[in-house]
């Protein structure tokens, strides 16, 4: 599967989905009080705990992404010219989704494997 967005944006999306899922679970559990009376209180408590676990997992994801984001190198995208952060050897631009890489071996535009650059350079490949 190809990345359709940058790695940081994808992880933030999963964090947001977990928050929404957790809140939805809690609202669904609260409806148990209206539908089932006294038994619904137990159902509501169980769903509240499950929703809170989902929200705490989301908080962990957001914390992890924040820590990664502070140490990620910032570079200018050669396609759109905007500043973007890059994780790992290959990533996508946060704005135009161009594939970026530090390693010439992953680039598709035919660099020589014999020559190594003195410092890391950004190489782009076009995505289809």
Image (cartoon, rainbow, N blue to C red):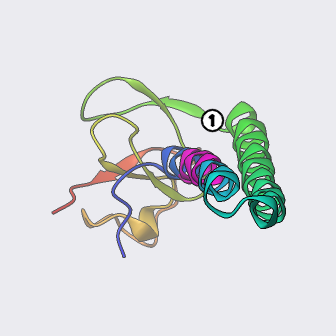
Seen as rendered, the residue at the extreme front is 37
The residue carrying pointer 1 sits among few (fewer than 14), some (14 to 19) or many (20 or more) residues within 10 Å by Cα, namely: few
User: Which residue in the protein does label 1 denote?
Assistant: 73
Look at the picture and state if 82 lies above or below 32.
above
Residue 84 % position (x, y)? 47, 31
> Percent position (x, y) of residue 102?
51, 53
Horizontally, residue 7 falls left or right of residue 122, namely right
Q: Is residue 18 magenta?
A: yes
Q: Secondary structure at mark 1?
A: loop
Q: Is residue 10 left or right of residue 2?
A: right
> Residue, x 36% and y 23% (percent of image)?
82
Q: Main secondary structure of the magenta part?
A: helix
The C terminus lies in which quarter of the figure?
bottom left
* Residue 98 pos. (x, y %): 29, 47
Q: Quadrant of residue 101?
A: bottom left
* Quadrant location, the N terminus: bottom left
Q: Is residue 126 left or right of residue 69?
A: left
> Closer to the camera, 24 or 44?
44
Residue ranking furthest to the bottom = 1
Identify the residue at the far top of this view. Answer: 82
**In this picture, which residue range is highlighted in magenta?**
14-24
Q: Judge whether residue 5 is colored magenta.
A: no
For the point 31% across and 46% down, the residue is: 97
Q: Nearer the viewer, residue 115 or 87?
A: 87
Identify the residue shown where x is 59% and y is 55%.
28
């Amino acid at each position: 599967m190809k990345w359709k967005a940058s790695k940081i944006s994808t992880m933030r999306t999963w964090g947001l989905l977990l928050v929404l899922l957790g809140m939805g679970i809690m609202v669904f559990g609260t409806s148990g009080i209206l539908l089932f009376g006294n038994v619904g209180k137990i159902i509501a408590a169980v769903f509240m705990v499950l929703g809170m676990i989902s929200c705490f997992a989301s908080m962990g994801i957001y914390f992890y992404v924040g820590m990664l984001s502070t140490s990620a190198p910032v570079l200018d995208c050669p396609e759109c010219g905007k500043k973007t952060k890059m994780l790992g050897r290959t990533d996508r631009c946060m704005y135009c989704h161009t594939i970026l890489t530090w390693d010439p071996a992953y680039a598709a535009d035919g660099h020589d494997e014999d020559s190594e650059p003195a410092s890391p350079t950004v190489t782009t490949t076009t995505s289809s």
